[in-house]
Image: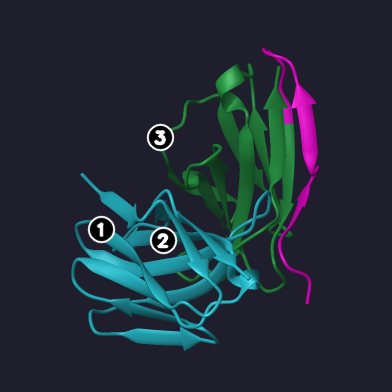
Chain colours: A cyan, B green
């Protein structure tokens, strides 16, 4: 059975305190892994797509990495505006839909 | 460049009623997917439309139906509303079936 598990469920960081969010997945035939950011009451905002183990992508203070079993979203020197829920989703080969985890709620304290 | 738009923003209905939600995809996109997001959960896939046909469907009952128009916009219809249908309904668009999906702001549906 396909599964996407994100940890931790919630994370509180001081401004400037770097950390990582984890997304572990079990899916037959991964086509791609996606990271989104979602602010309360709004739609998810696309961040990254990763397609193969060893791939890395960066955007400002965020860096996403992928292995055969999990993905990490590293946040370097976060700012309060990075506070949001970060969602991980997988897409199987031959399928069109995204299968989401339940997200990590990040709070960055000034 | 307009992103994905959805209407209405909020909607309140009573049990048993029917509702129609609307979505306009991002400029240049031809594929629309619909997701349901309950509070504190990740979005769950309802179905996807491409070339005016339903291409894939998630585990949702037939009360959920949709349509895609020639201009690529889409509607989601839900019949015989249940309390459990209360959620944020998200539309996502992409260029063809397998590319990155970009989400709209969502429609908050409350069923009383």
Q: Are marks 1 and 3 in contact (CB under 8 Å)?
A: no
**Circles 1 and 3 on the same subunit:** no
Residue under the image location 68 percent in, 13 percent down: B15
* Residue B11 coordinates in the image, percent (x, y): 78, 32
* Residue A56 coordinates in the image, percent (x, y): 35, 85
Local packing at callout 3 (Cα closer than 10 Å; few below 14, some 14-19, many 20+) is: few
User: What whole-number distance in Å separates the C-alpha atoms at marks 1 and 3?
Assistant: 20 Å
Local packing at callout 1 (Cα closer than 10 Å; few below 14, some 14-19, many 20+) is: many
User: Up-down: is A77 above or below A102?
Assistant: below
Q: On the picture, is A41 further left or further right than A65?
A: right
- Magenta span has B17? yes
Q: Quadrant of residue A39?
A: bottom right
In this picture, which residue range is highlighted in magenta?
B1-19
Q: On the picture, is A86 further left or further right than B68?
A: left
Q: Which mark is residue B12?
A: none
Subunit of label 1: A
What secondary structure is found at the residue carrying circle 1? strand
- Magenta span has A24? no
What secondary structure is found at the residue carrying circle 2? strand
**Circles 3 and 2 on the same subunit:** no
Residue at mark 1? A25
Q: Quadrant of residue B29?
A: bottom right
Q: Are marks 1 and 2 in contact (CB under 8 Å)?
A: yes
Subunit of label 3: B
* Residue B99 coordinates in the image, percent (x, y): 48, 71
Q: Which mark is residue B59?
A: 3
Residue at mark 2? A88
User: Up-down: is A98 above or below B36?
Assistant: below
What is the quadrant of the N terminus of chain B in the image?
A: bottom right
User: What whole-number distance in Å separates the C-alpha atoms at marks 3 and 2?
Assistant: 20 Å
* Residue B55 coordinates in the image, percent (x, y): 46, 50
What is the quadrant of the C terminus of chain B in the image?
A: top right
């Amino acid at each position: 059975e396909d599964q996407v598990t994100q940890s931790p469920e919630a994370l509180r960081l001081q401004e400037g305190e770097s950390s990582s969010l984890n997304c572990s997945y079990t899916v037959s035939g991964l086509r791609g892994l996606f990271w989104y950011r979602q602010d309360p009451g709004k739609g998810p905002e696309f961040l990254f797509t990763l397609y193969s183990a060893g791939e890395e992508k960066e955007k400002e203070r965020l860096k996403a990495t992928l292995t055969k079993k999990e993905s990490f979203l590293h946040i370097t020197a976060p700012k309060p505006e990075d506070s949001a829920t970060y969602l991980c989703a997988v897409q199987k080969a031959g399928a069109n839909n995204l299968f989401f985890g339940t997200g990590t709620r990040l709070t960055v304290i000034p | 460049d307009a992103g994905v738009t959805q209407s209405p923003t909020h909607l309140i209905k009573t049990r048993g009623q029917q509702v129609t939600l609307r979505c306009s995809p991002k400029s240049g996109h031809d594929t629309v997917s619909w997701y349901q997001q309950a509070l504190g959960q990740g979005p769950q896939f309802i179905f996807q439309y491409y070339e005016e046909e339903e291409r894939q469907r998630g585990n949702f009952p037939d009360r959920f139906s949709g349509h895609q128009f020639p201009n690529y916009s889409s509607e989601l219809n839900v019949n015989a509303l249940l309390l459990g249908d209360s959620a944020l309904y998200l539309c996502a668009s992409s260029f063809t079936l397998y590319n990155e999906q970009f989400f709209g702001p969502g429609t908050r549906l409350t069923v009383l």
